[in-house]
Image (cartoon, rainbow, N blue to C red):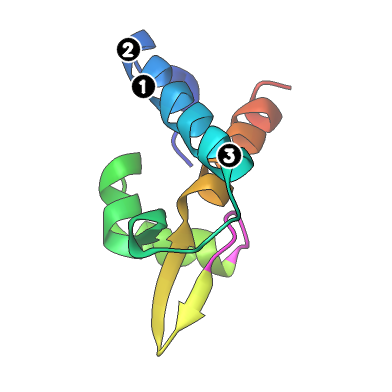
Amino acid sequence: MKNFYNFSENFIKEFINSLRQMVEELLASDFVLNRKQLLTEKQVALFLGVSERSMRTYRSEKHFHFIKLDGNIYYLSIILYIDLIIKSLESGL
């Protein structure tokens, strides 16, 4: 898996701001799942800079939590971000 320490400082700041915004939205109101919170496997692969095949491997190895709806794979953005933080911490140990 790609080492997340190789991301630029700007990328990491944007990542943290996105996570902070999602948490604030969750705390400010009742959690309502909407389409913008769901990412497709292709979107996550582009975000991580890996192939869709790699994403399927990561999924089968249970690296990331996912949701399967109507035969399609989705990742809940806030859970994906938490998974990425955990993976980054684990790779730094």
Tell me if mark 2 has few (under 14), some (14-19) or many (20+) residues whose alpha carbon lies within 10 angstroms of its own.
few
The amino acid type, in three-letter code, at marker 1 is Glu
Q: List the single residue furthest toward the top.
A: 9
Across and down, in percent, residue 91 comes to 64, 29
Vertical position of residue 91 compared to residue 62: above or below: above
For the residue marked with disc 2, what is the amino acid? Asn
Q: Nearer the viewer, mark 1 or mark 3?
A: 3
Image depth: mark 2 or mark 1 in front: 1
* Residue that label 1 marks: 14
Residue where numbered disc 2 is placed: 10
* Residue 37, x across and y down, in percent: 41, 55
Secondary structure at numbered mark 1: helix
Earlier sequence position, callout 1 versus callout 3 = 1
Most common SS among magenta residues:
loop
- Percent x, y of residue 72: 37, 80
Q: CA distance from mark 1 to mark 3?
A: 21 Å
Give percent across and percent down for residue 2: 44, 36
Which of pointers 2 and 3 lies earlier in the amino acid sequence? 2
77 and 6: which is toward the camera: 77
- Amino acid at circle 3: Ala
Query: Residue beneath label 3, please?
Result: 28
Q: Within the image, what quadrant is residue 73 found in?
A: bottom left
Would you say the residues marked 2 and 1 are in contact, meaning their CB atoms lie under 8 Å apart? yes
In this picture, which residue range is highlighted in magenta?
A: 61-66
